[in-house]
Image: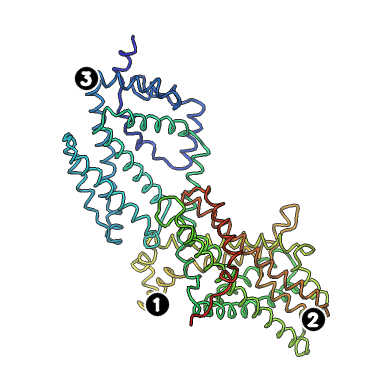
């Protein structure tokens, strides 16, 4: 059989559609199917165009495919088959798009966000007249698909209102892929002899075919989706931790002072617990409750713990980096201005925490030395507390980095729960549950659902952070090296309790104070960096411009360091 005989029997439908509903499986089944296909590769049917393409690479397109496509299109019967398969593929993909648009859950979301969904109905009408090959019809089709694309992008941009989930993210990504593929097929339909259009589709298919069984790519894509669900909502929370003007800057300082006051008290509780509870497991439990209760109370009274914010603010930066939702770095100067706001907001909150935690601890320690009650901070304990803050001899840098990891994890947990509440419409479901309303009055039920909607994520983050910090030392019993945490606010308090209960030189105290700020810096950098990189991954943003952003930020900091620390009072 000659080459012309072979190419005349090619079917193009599966090549054109590219996507099959049969491949919409979950993560585990996706892993198994890829492993199986690696062992026994999936071979296209012999009468399909994919079978012909499978042995070629993109490098030899000009010498192989172009000649083949020219031969196919020069045969009237084959050309008619191609055009028929192309119309079927456009209809198939359009039907998938339309079915999503008419889905009742999508319709509910569109109504909630006030998004016009009439474009899906219009597409249904346009597809039924696909045989019309006028330029006007082509333009109408492409414009309508672009409007449909915008409805999905608007939906994705408003995830803070509706929440997000793995399923919603997968579906919207798939829908955008369908739209992009349909656009390319429409361009080909109205330019059937275009070598450029054919080349684009063929090279895209070959590149896709190379990686479709890649376990690494499959895992990476699903990791991105999981990251979206974890961090997306923290971007909205992070905006609350930015001081926009001098008045807000002072408010942050006052809230930092309030947070430091509570931390000083709970740091003393931790010292007392350490004296009386010596068994590891009970000690870890009581430490955890002490930390968690501290964070919850600080939040309840409106205080701020500075190092709990970086996980939120990093998400906010990433949101502004990709504010056009095009997976690219946007205006660098705007990002630098945002970095200034974040760093100076963190700085003033941290100063409030430090000044109050340190000074109040000194005051409490002095009162304890007067002998009214038994002083829990004896000489050996005082030496132990001050040694903990030194960066090298006390291992403070390493332990502060561990605390930074836990701080970022707690931010993820907070965002995850906030997102779940939104995505599952949890407050509404509780309010209309058959059982719960019978237990609570209408007023209490409303208060409870408001708490769930507004505060569940925050408290989940606070409690989880408390247990992370309280149980960290237990990991020492599992691994062959010491694991502990250092947190700037608690270290500030410990330093205050220590120096009043012992005699230290001025140089030792000065070094200890500097060490506390080093702990805070490490807490911030580690927490911020982990969240920032995860958010970039969740949005699929390439990090090739990250170096440029870091370089520009460093230059800006060196030229205007005070812009990163203070907000000047406007005259």
Residue assigned mark 2: 501
Q: Dot 1: within a 10 Å radius of its alpha carbon, few (fewer than 14), some, or many (20 or more) residues?
A: few
Label located before the other in sequence (1 or 3): 3
Label drawn at residue 76: 3
Q: Dot 3: within a 10 Å radius of its alpha carbon, few (fewer than 14), some, or many (20 or more) residues?
A: few
Residue depicted at x 42% and y 57%: 323
| Secondary structure beneath label 3 | helix
Label drawn at residue 444: 1
Label located before the other in sequence (2 or 3): 3
Kindly report the distance in space between the C-alpha atoms of the residues bearing marks 1 and 3: 75 Å
Task: Tell me residue 502's x, y (percent).
Answer: 82, 80
Residue depicted at x 57% and y 78%: 253
Q: Is residue 458 left or right of residue 63?
A: right
Label drawn at residue 53: none
Say above or below: 74 vs 326.
above
Q: Nearer the viewer, residue 330 or 179?
A: 330
Q: Nearer the viewer, residue 31 or 81?
A: 81
- Quadrant location of the N terminus? top left
Q: How is the image coloured?
A: rainbow
């Amino acid at each position: 059989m000659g080459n012309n005989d072979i190419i005349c029997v090619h079917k193009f439908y599966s090549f054109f559609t590219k996507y099959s509903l049969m491949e919409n499986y979950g993560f585990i089944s996706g892993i198994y199917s890829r492993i199986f296909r690696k062992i026994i590769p999936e071979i296209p049917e012999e009468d399909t165009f994919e079978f012909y393409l499978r042995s070629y690479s993109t490098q030899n397109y000009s010498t192989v495919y172009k000649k083949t496509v020219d031969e196919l299109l020069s045969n009237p019967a084959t050309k008619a088959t191609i055009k028929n398969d192309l119309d079927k593929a456009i209809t198939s993909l359009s039907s998938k798009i339309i079915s999503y648009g008419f889905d009742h859950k999508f319709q509910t979301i569109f109504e909630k966000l006030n998004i016009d969904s009439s474009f899906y109905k219009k597409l249904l009408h346009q597809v039924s007249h696909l045989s019309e090959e006028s330029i006007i019809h082509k333009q109408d089709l492409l414009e309508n698909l672009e409007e449909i694309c915008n409805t999905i992008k608007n939906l994705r941009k408003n995830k803070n209102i509706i929440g997000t989930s793995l399923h919603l993210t997968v579906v919207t990504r798939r829908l955008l892929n369908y739209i992009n593929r349909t656009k390319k097929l429409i361009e080909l339909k109205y330019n059937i002899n275009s070598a450029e259009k054919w080349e684009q589709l063929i090279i895209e298919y070959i590149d896709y075919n190379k990686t479709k069984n890649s376990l690494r790519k499959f895992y990476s894509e699903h990791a991105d989706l999981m990251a979206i669900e974890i961090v997306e909502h923290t971007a909205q929370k992070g905006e609350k931790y930015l001081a926009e003007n001098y008045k807000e800057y002072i408010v942050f300082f006052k809230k930092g002072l309030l947070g430091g006051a509570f931390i000083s008290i709970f740091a003393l509780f931790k010292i007392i617990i350490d004296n009386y509870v010596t068994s590891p497991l009970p000690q870890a439990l009581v430490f955890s409750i002490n930390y968690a209760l501290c964070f919850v109370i600080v939040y309840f009274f409106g205080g701020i713990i500075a190092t709990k914010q970086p996980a939120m603010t990093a998400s906010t930066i990433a949101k502004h980096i990709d504010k056009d939702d095009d997976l690219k770095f946007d205006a660098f100067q705007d990002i630098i201005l945002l970095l200034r706001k974040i760093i100076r907001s963190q700085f003033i909150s941290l100063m409030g925490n430090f000044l109050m935690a340190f000074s109040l601890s000194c005051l409490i320690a002095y009162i304890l030395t007067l002998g009214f009650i038994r002083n829990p901070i004896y000489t050996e304990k005082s030496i132990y507390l001050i040694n903990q803050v030194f960066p090298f001899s006390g291992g403070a840098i390493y332990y502060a980095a561990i605390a930074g990891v836990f701080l970022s994890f707690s931010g993820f947990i907070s965002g995850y729960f906030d997102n779940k509440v939104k995505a599952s419409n949890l407050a509404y479901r509780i309010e209309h549950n058959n059982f719960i309303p019978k237990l609570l009055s209408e007023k209490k039920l409303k208060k409870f659902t408001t708490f769930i909607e507004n505060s569940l994520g925050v408290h989940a983050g606070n409690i989880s952070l408390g247990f992370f910090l309280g149980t960290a030392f237990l990991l020492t019993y599992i691994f062959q090296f010491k694991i502990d945490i250092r947190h700037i606010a608690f270290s500030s308090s410990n330093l205050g309790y220590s120096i009043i209960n012992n005699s230290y030189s001025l140089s030792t105290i000065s070094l200890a104070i500097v060490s506390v700020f080093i702990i805070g810096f490490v807490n911030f950098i580690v927490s911020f960096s982990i969240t920032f990189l995860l958010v970039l991954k969740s949005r699929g943003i390439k990090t090739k411009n990250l170096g440029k952003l870091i370089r520009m930020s460093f230059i800006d900091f060196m030229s205007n360091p005070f812009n990163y620390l203070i907000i000047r009072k406007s005259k």
